[in-house]
Amino acid sequence: MDLLALSLGFLSDINWVLIAQLTMLALVLLAGPVVIFALAAFKGDL
């Protein structure tokens, strides 16, 4: 059991809030180009 606790110990050291914030930031930054490409694909008629 100690081996399992040691191998999963790094999960408690991860800053999950930072990972969530960076993921949301990436989604917001990717949303802009996605809208532009969608507008171009539908010739401006969404």
Image (cartoon, grey):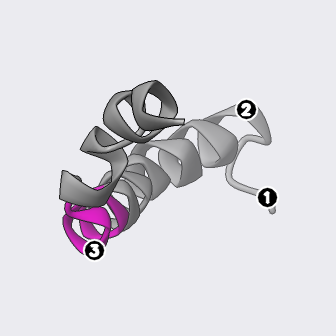
Distance from disc 3 to disc 2, alpha carbons, whole Å, reads: 36 Å
Question: Which secondary structure class fits the magenta region best?
Answer: helix
> Which numbered disc flags the more N-terminal residue, 3 or 2?
3
Give the residue type that dot 3 points to. Answer: Val
Q: Which residue shows up at 30% across the image and 58% down it?
A: 12
Q: Which residue shows up at 26% across the image and 41% down it?
A: 10
Which element type, helix, strand or loop, lies under badge 3? helix
Which element type, helix, strand or loop, lies under badge 1? loop
For the residues carrying marks 3 and 2, which lies nearer the camera in this image?
3
Is residue 41 or residue 8 the one in the foreground?
Answer: 8
Specify few, some or many for label 1: CA neighbours under 10 Å numbering under 14, 14-19, or 20 or more. few
> Label 2 belongs to which residue?
41
Left or right: residue 15 versus residue 3 is left
Picture disc at residue 45 = 1
Q: Quadrant of the C terminus?
A: bottom right
In the image, residue 34 sits, relative to residue 17, either above or below, namely above
Is residue 5 or residue 8 the one in the foreground?
Answer: 5
Distance from disc 2 to disc 1, alpha carbons, whole Å, reads: 9 Å
In the image, residue 3 sits, relative to residue 33, either above or below, namely above
> Label 3 belongs to which residue?
17
Specify few, some or many for label 2: CA neighbours under 10 Å numbering under 14, 14-19, or 20 or more. few
Disc 3 to disc 2: CB gap under 8 Å = no
Give the residue type that dot 2 points to. Answer: Ala
Q: Can you tell which quarter of the image residue 37 is in?
A: top right
Is residue 17 or residue 31 the one in the foreground?
Answer: 17
In the image, residue 34 sits, relative to residue 4, either above or below, namely below
Magenta stretch bounds: 15-22
How far from the left and from the top, in percent, is residue 3? 43, 25
How far from the left and from the top, in percent, is residue 14? 23, 53
